[in-house]
Image: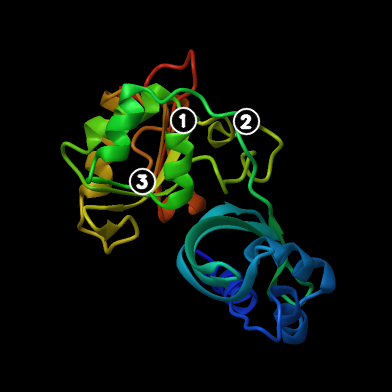
């Protein structure tokens, strides 16, 4: 793996996200040596009403890895002081990086989150997921579910999995890369049909070897109908729905592609 990619992304976010009355996120980055173009994209971390901010990186997840480019999908928590009082919020930020000629990684930009469009009526399944204490949703994913943007079959799988596991979600739609990095192929995350899970029963998916929870969850998700099941181990090959690569060693990806059969072991 390439831990320096995550460290670089986290340092960029922490530098940008901690400012006071006499500074801004962009100014912080420029002073730290970031390019003005990269620094300008950090304005997403500083709402117009904010006068000071503190940022903590909750979890940096790999979003894509290529030879000289990479993406990190980072869940961050912000404690903002605004003109109307304190504001605590969570964001999922798509951080794009490039490898410099000397081999070091640098952040090129933060990609603004997209929207799936107008809210839709809340289904009974969505309401059940929102109320389920064993499905831990960060604010952006909770908003995705609350506004009816997430596929009902995917939500039903999560709800069924929560009978056996406690699931800590990293990202659904908002903040995720919209294509399958580094291609132009549209991701199921972009259309509300995929979810990434970073912890099972409070243990990171990247926990030491010997924890069989990721494998058990992957198998169970396939039994429940997931057509894409990615994680630390390839259970049966990409042509049958299961897959693994360097990107998916730190989370489990569950997706639904209409018309495809569920992932299967035979």
Check the image and report above or below for 148 versus 137. Answer: above
**Where residue 117 is drawn, which disc sits there?**
2
N-terminal label among 2 and 3? 2
Kindly check if marks 2 and 3 are in contact, taking CB atoms under 8 A apart as contact.
no
Image coordinates for residue 79, horizontal then vertical, percent: 49, 71
Q: CA distance from mark 1 to mark 3?
A: 26 Å
Which residue is denoted by mark 1 in the rendering?
A: 150
Check the image and report above or below for 186 versus 234. Answer: above
Residue 21 lies left or right of residue 1; in this view the side is: right
N-terminal label among 1 and 2? 2
Q: CA distance from mark 1 to mark 2?
A: 12 Å
The quadrant the C terminus occupies is top left
Kindly check if marks 1 and 3 are in contact, taking CB atoms under 8 A apart as contact.
no
Of residue 117 and residue 12, the one placed in the foreground of this image is 117
Nearer mark to the viewer, of 1 and 2: 2
Q: Quadrant of residue 208?
A: bottom left
Image coordinates for residue 193, horizontal then vertical, percent: 48, 29
């Amino acid at each position: 793996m390439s831990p320096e990619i995550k460290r670089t992304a986290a340092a960029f976010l922490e530098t940008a996200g901690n400012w006071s009355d006499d500074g801004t996120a962009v100014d912080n980055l420029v002073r730290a040596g970031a390019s003005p173009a990269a620094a300008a994209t950090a304005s997403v971390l500083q709402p117009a009403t904010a006068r000071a901010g503190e940022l903590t990186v909750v979890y940096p997840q790999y979003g894509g890895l290529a030879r000289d480019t990479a993406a990190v999908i980072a869940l961050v928590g912000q404690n903002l002081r605004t003109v109307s009082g304190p504001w605590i919020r969570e964001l999922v930020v798509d951080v794009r990086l490039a490898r410099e000629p000397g081999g070091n990684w640098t952040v090129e930009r933060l990609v603004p989150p997209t929207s799936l469009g107008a809210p839709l009526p809340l289904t009974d399944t969505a309401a059940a997921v929102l109320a389920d204490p064993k499905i831990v949703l960060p604010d952006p994913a909770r908003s995705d579910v609350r506004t009816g943007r997430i596929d009902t079959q995917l939500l039903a799988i999560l709800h069924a999995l929560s009978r056996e596991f406690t699931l800590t979600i990293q990202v659904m739609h908002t903040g995720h890369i919209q294509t399958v990095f580094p291609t132009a192929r549209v991701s199921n995350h972009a259309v509300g049909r995929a979810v990434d899970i970073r912890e099972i029963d409070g243990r990171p998916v990247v926990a030491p070897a010997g924890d069989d929870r990721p494998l058990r969850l992957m198998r169970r998700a396939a039994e429940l109908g997931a057509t894409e099941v990615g994680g630390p181990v390839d259970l049966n090959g990409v042509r049958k729905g299961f897959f693994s690569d360097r990107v998916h060693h730190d989370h489990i990806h569950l997706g639904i592609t209409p018309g495809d059969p569920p992932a299967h072991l035979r």
